[in-house]
Image (cartoon, rainbow, N blue to C red):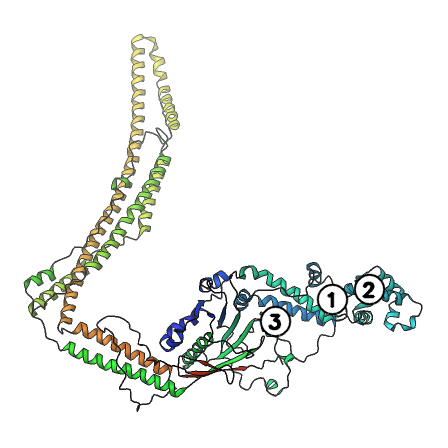
Amino acid sequence: MTELLTVIIAEKNILAGFERFRIFLEPLLRERGVAVCEWNAEAESIAEMTPSLPEAVATEEDWRAIIVCGGGRRRKNPFDYTGYHERCGEKPPQTWEEIAARREKRFACYENAVHNPLWKLASALCGTGAFQPSLEEGKFDAVAMGETHTGELMLSKFLETADAAEAVRLLSGADGEKLPAFLKEAEPSALARMMKRRDAKGIFGLLGQEHLLRFLRMFGNADPRVTDPEYTEYILENTKKNRVIASVAPDFDYRGVLPSEVLCVALRTYDGNGAEPKINWGSFTENDYSRFSEFNLYPDKLKFMAFDVRDDAHNKFDYDLLRFLGFVLILANNEIPAGAMSKNRLYLARCENDNDALSALLTAYDTKLQKTAIHLTELREEALLSDQKPYGDASFMKKAESPVVIPLLTDKTVEVNALKLSYRQIGLSRDCPLDENAFLSEQYAELKKNFRRYLKQPRRALAGAVEELRRQHTVTDKELHYLSAFQLDDVTERINGAEQRIAAAQTSNIYDTEKYDETMEREKHALQKYIAERMTKRTAIAAGAAALLAYFLGFVPLLITSANTAGSFVFSVLFTAAACGLLALCGLGGLFWLRRGLIARFKKFNEAMAAMVSELTNSIHGFSKYLTHVCAFMRGYSVLNQMNELDKPGAADGKLYHKHMQDIQKTREQFKILFSDIALPSDTDFSHINIYDFDFLQAVDYTYDVPFEEVRNNKIEFMREGNFVKSPVSFVKAITLKREELYDV
């Protein structure tokens, strides 16, 4: 038994399994020193990924973590997120091109690894130390972009050493017979001059890729930084790892106390029967083991375990999941034996049950449920045989038939007068005394806003009326007496009448705002068209003046001919003035007539608005009548329903008993499906088992716990032969661990 707090970090569906199978895991869940934390695998920061973790370990100086993984279940190694493999025993790359091609694949693998949710969580819990040794950023970028060759890096390192001077002396010497043929071909004197200048690029071009490595091994004095390309690639890969980790590490920097141990446990549905014969028959060493941990950038602190379960669609999956959850809880309560697991290796864990002990427990459980169901059957029969109550009188009938009016009350936030256009300020021309287009637009915008507010009133009134209907639609009197047969007929007749009135009720759609908008826009456009046809002040004056002038010119001949005599001329002047005045009055009358036409258009718009308001008002009254009839209909049926139940005084209690009987039956069916492989003996004596002591007259969904007996000094084999730990349950016999032989062949 471990004294450290163990935090189980799992996704929501796994944690739901603990709750779902709680009754079977109760003794294990009661153990102290275990906390659970939800893992949001899709999150992009440790704070969002495990929001409850800081609180769970806030007071702990040391703790351990168990990460439960659900992804990659169909792979033999569910932790191999990248899926990148290099065949064991295969010769390393022989040419510079092969080295570069392998490097490119590995770099792509590392870039993929940091997207693994498990890596993100593990890096937060284990820390992300830098890989050493690494290369300067500038040199790494030059290699990654193809500007520099790996051989040039090795050559540059060689030129920084003292051995370069000896190489210059030898190459500059007269005794050329000691030099290999490839150096003679490369002109030793030219090579020596380049080495003095430390011209790595020139030397690389002179020797070429073919002879460069032979040259370095000849003069490099066995320094791996100079003579071994694999070591140089190792440095390049370390630099790449540091770079990709740094790109995401800030978001997964956990500030709290890190766990001393991190165990990764995964569900697995891999079926490897008949697969990988090379592994089954091959001979391998530890160096040949899969490098999945390296290629997935997992910290060395992690330890990996897989637990085999059947596919989700299999009818035994739930049983396998229950075994897995039990294994996780036992693992959380006990320390891993020293030496039982190695880093960077995958192990297969199994939970072996004691079927005899499990069978006895399940039989006791079934017996307890069955006895309780029998007891409920007896209680139900007693309730249904209880004495009946006497019939009621007319006072109850009056209460049962009293109508309930469901009103639709509006809040009157918008007065009807605010839904009209004013036309008192309209003048004789389109722009005098005000601009009629602007006048109309301003009023229309305010009216439309008011109408929108007004439209909310019927809808809100209807919603309030529906709530009132819900409160009034039943007759709830716990002291109701029975109706006589004649009273029952009266209630039924009232229900039928209410049903007919419901069918005849007329309502309209108060939510069809488009219809009202179309009407308003149509009337507005008619107003705008009429206004557009009216003259402006300037046009009216100009037209009037022109008409008067033309009319006056028609009288000029008369004035000229009558100018001989004073009397005739005066008469002609008066006649002309009277005629022009009459024409002016006619023009002014025309302007008043056009104004009257515009006012008529305004009135027509207001009449359309009044019609819509009237329609909404009628709709409110219609809905009120409709809901009132519905309420009467529902209240009548509530009376009849209560009377039907009261035909058997114990019906209410009987229903509750029946409900709990169904719950028990469902529980029995579920656990028998779950443990269908476990035989339940029928000859075991369980006379000492009592029924569940619940208040079955309450409409509560009770949890029927498994009758676990207190287990003392029960020990099970744990992880390795000869290692035993205490277990609070007797049906688990052993937790075994076996290393999976993973070799990339």
Q: Closer to the observer: label 3 or label 2?
A: 2
Q: Amino acid at mark 2?
A: Ala
Total numbered labels placed on residues in the image: 3
Residue 579 lies, with reference to residue 223, above or below; the image says: above
Q: Amino acid at mark 1?
A: Thr
For marks 3 and 2, give the CA distance: 37 Å
Disc 3 packing (10 Å; few <14; some 14–19; many ≥20): many
Direction from residue 282 to residue 600 in the image, left or right: left
Residue 530 lies, with reference to residue 648, above or below; the image says: above
Q: Earlier in the sequence, mark 3 or mark 2?
A: 2
Find residue 459 and report its horizontal and vertical position in percent. 27, 52
Q: Is residue 76 visible?
A: no
Q: Which residue is mark 3?
A: 295
Q: Are marks 3 and 1 in contact (CB under 8 Å)?
A: no
Q: Which mark is residue 594?
A: none
For the C terminus, give its image quadrant. bottom right
For marks 3 and 1, give the CA distance: 21 Å
Q: Which mark is residue 150?
A: 1
Find residue 591 and report its horizontal and vertical position in percent. 31, 29
